[in-house]
Amino acid sequence: MGHNLYSNEKHDHDNHHGEQLIEDVTEFYSAIDRCNLSRQLSSERPYIYYTMEVYDQSNGIRGGGGLGVLAADTRRVAQELDIPLVLITPFYRQELTQVISNLSQTEELKNVSPLDHGYEFVDDVWIHIKDQPDVILNIYQKILGSTRFLTMSEPNFGELYAGDGSGDHRLYQMISLGFGGYWAMKRLGIKPAIIQLNETATVFAAVARLNELCSNGMNLYEALVYVRKHTLYTNHTLVQAAESEFSYDQFDRFVFPNITSPALRRWIGGLFVDGRLKLSTLTIELAEAKNGVSRLHAKVADYRDINGEKVKFRAVTNGIDINTWVHPSIVTYFRDKEIIDKFNLPAENYIENIAKIPASDIRELKINGRRHLNQILAHRQDQYGNPIQIPEDAIVFDFKRRFVEYKRPWLPFENLDTLKQILLENNAHYVAAGRVHLGDTRMYQRLQQVLAAIDADPVLKERVHYIQNYNEELGLALAVGADVAINVPIVGLEACGTSFMKDIANFKILISTPDGGVADLQPAPVLEVLGHDYHAEVESVYAHMRHACKIIRDDHLLESEVHRQLTAYLPIISGARMMKDYLKFLFPGR
């Protein structure tokens, strides 16, 4: 069990900083006038964080994208700040690996086990399915300082996001997380101070809590009021139509057998419309606090409650764990120059101190990053199965995001002659990485078309590299080692995105549309991609790529752009800021 947050003893922490005085943590809370947290959060009553995915390879769990990366960063930040937090997630026994063969993506399944990554077996819990034998879920945990992973799994659990989003197996995975995770928590004597539901797939945790209260004698209305006040729904998807929905028959087979309260079963049954229920409808009904993950996202997310009223989301923009995603030499530099404080929040005079960063320091620190990138690329494979090395004097553009339609990874390849000219004239390379989601046939074809176009041109074949099997290791290497980041989602479709934060924190130049977290500031203080139509956006990207090369080559321009980006976004980037915002939101001062 994690230790008490507010003792006056000194503890050893399994984190990036070694020993830390608890008085420092108390100071963190005092700074936001939330000292009463000591009466609301403890190792016995922790912050409970539910997610279908985590992307934390160091702890043996590989997610699918940004949601998983955010979950891992949230736990790391909680550990660094000594916040009692339990992250509840499935441990998928099979893991998908991307392989490029004949310039096309294929997938390989790899078997993994929690026992191979330091997890300890806790207990078994049972999931009930109508007219089928009970499923035994194995519960494992791993304690890391004030935080812990609590995971559930069984040999036939399958991989992340297996099957159709509204299919039986996906619903089975969801109830395993919700009910199984809640029962495992109770077996360990953990009482949640707050439950954060990341996306609607986690809603059955709130249902399990509601069922427990009703089964213990509380009437349904009182139980609903209690659960709503202690549940946060964090939305990462902009359109309600994209959410999973299930039939009454599926609930009857998979959900209702795990609910002992007849009143609760009837109440849920009353939410169905034409025999179907969107999980977002159920989640909205069970969470009083609701947030989007950037300002724009909270504004444009289009969700309706059971009465058809538009749901209001509060904005809590995502952040990153600076210790994980920023090169150690840059983190040390930020601290030495009093740009960030001991909590990784912006220091008191961060604006003035950022303005003093000279180009010579930026270049020296970027050399460290390039070396790290080449070390990683030496044992990775490009689209031809070969390792690559980037010349030290070359400019590197990168695109490191899921290869999904709204992110438009193909956009810089719309005019191959222009791209080729930019790369040749500026001694530049373009490194791309990102996996197509399983079953996305349209994007499989897009990726194949891009790779074929590169293969057909000798210049592009030499200077454009698609790195297979994108993961945390490669994401970090590109964040610290590339010079210019390309981020061109269709405006209004990116919930937040955190890759751009890693780029800015590592002194990279950002070319981006004003979407997601980038749009928290208007106009966006980056090389902003604008245009009245798609063609104009493409031309804007190329113009910014040329300008970015000029910036990289010129000390004055480099200083000016790095200062502008870092000054504007440092307060947003900080994962400690994100945690601080959540604590202020969930535990208001009294």
Image: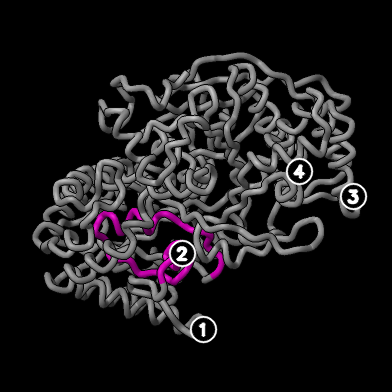
Q: Is residue 455 above or below residue 534?
A: above
- What span is in magenta? 492-521
The answer to whether marks 4 and 2 mark residues whose Cβ atoms lie closer than 8 Å is: no
> On residue 121, which mark appears?
none
Give how far across and how far down residue 476 sits, in percent: 33, 47
Amino acid found under the numbered disc labelled 4:
Gly
Q: Is residue 201 above or below residue 11?
A: below
Amino acid found under the numbered disc labelled 2:
Pro
> On residue 275, which mark appears?
3
Give how far across and how far down residue 238 sits, in percent: 61, 61
Q: Is residue 443 above or below residue 271?
A: below
Q: Which residue is mark 1?
A: 533
Q: Which residue is mark 4?
A: 167
State how the image is colored. one colour
The answer to whether marks 4 and 3 mark residues whose Cβ atoms lie closer than 8 Å is: no
Q: Nearer the viewer, mark 1 or mark 2?
A: 1
Q: Residues within 10 Å of mark 1 (few under 14, many from 20)?
A: few
Q: Counting residues from the N terminus, which is met first, the one under dot 4 or under dot 3?
A: 4
Amino acid found under the numbered disc labelled 3:
Gly
Q: Nearer the viewer, mark 4 or mark 3?
A: 3
Give how far across and how far down residue 143 sits, in percent: 45, 22
